[in-house]
Image: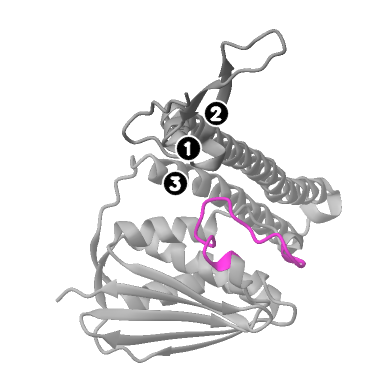
Amino acid sequence: IATAVRSKNFKYLGDNIYKINLFENSKGESDIKLVVNFVGKKAFVIKSISLMILLSVFLSLVIMITFFYAYRLLNKQRNVSQIKTDFINNMTHELKTPIATIGLAIDFIRNPKVINDEVMRENYLNMIDQENKRINAQVENVLRISKLEKKQYNIPKSRQNAHLLIEEALSNLDSQIKEFGASVTVELTATSYFVLANKTNIVTSLMNIIENSLKYSEKKPNINIYSENFKNSIILKIKDEGIGIHKNARKNIFDIFFRESTGDIHNVQGCGLGLAYVKKIMDDHHAEVDVKSKKGKGTQIIIRLPLIS
């Protein structure tokens, strides 16, 4: 007699049904079958391996993050190594040129004809003096940047006339301006111009900016310097018509040792310290410095210094 014994929730669900014969005869036949219905099979399987899946995902994320961090670190180290190499090469070139010039000047002075010619002797002595100052300026830039980076540089400040600081910077660069055959237009229209500043550092910063305008030009440099007042500040603008700065490089222009690596820019002497120094000094003076530039169209550096009464 056929008998059906089943559990209360048993249902035939196709793929989840498992059958096996019970009490088979010698021919492998049986009238009794055990039928099992595996309810919630997928949920059971997923639940049983869910911990393993979560651990696998977690470990995969850890490996990916570690790989990304290692890649960034390696890339950073490679960039630092490249910057270090470029800096050493540029600084070597910066120092080698004046040293060679001084050596030549000394050889000329030793010449009997020059020794007896007071005018020529004075010219060569002036050349030695200028090149010596140039070497000293490069060494001072490196030392200043190092101290500023470590915040060991104490900058005393006093009441200064911003217009006079611009005039002094131009006076210090007079020989270079003549050497480049540059045209410099100065329009100082600000009516309030007294600032709390360190004279030496602000003048040096202005000189660094103007020197860049002189060096980074494919033709005779044309430089315009303006001043104006805005709220409680004096705005200084130094604009040139040089080779300009590429859009991708502008965000790094104030980074230490950074020099744009496209075009002919590396044909120009420099160590990537000038604008980095400017940014550090302006930050110390609670001032703002910004750059506006377009490749092939020139560059404008804007400095905003807070006024004092």
**Which residue appears at 62% of the width and 12% of the height?**
24
- In the image, what residue occupies the spot 35% across and 29% down? 7
| Picture disc at residue 206 | none
Q: Quadrant of residue 3?
A: top left
Residue under numbered circle 2: 18
Name which residue lies at 49% across and 35% down. 57
The residues colored magenta run 249-265
Query: Which is more N-terminal, label 2 or label 3?
Result: 2
CB contact under 8 Å: marks 1 and 2: no
User: Who is closer to the viewer here, 118 or 78?
Assistant: 78
Q: Nearer the viewer, residue 189 or 90?
A: 90
What is the crowding at mark 3: few (fewer than 14 residues within 10 Å), some, or many (at least 20)?
A: some
- Image quadrant occupied by the C terminus: bottom left
Q: CA distance from mark 3 to mark 2?
A: 83 Å
What label does residue 42 carry, if any? 1
Dominant secondary structure of the residues highlighted in magenta in the image: loop
- What type is the residue that disc 2 sits on? Tyr
Q: Is residue 128 visible?
A: yes
Determine which residue is flagged by label 3: 144
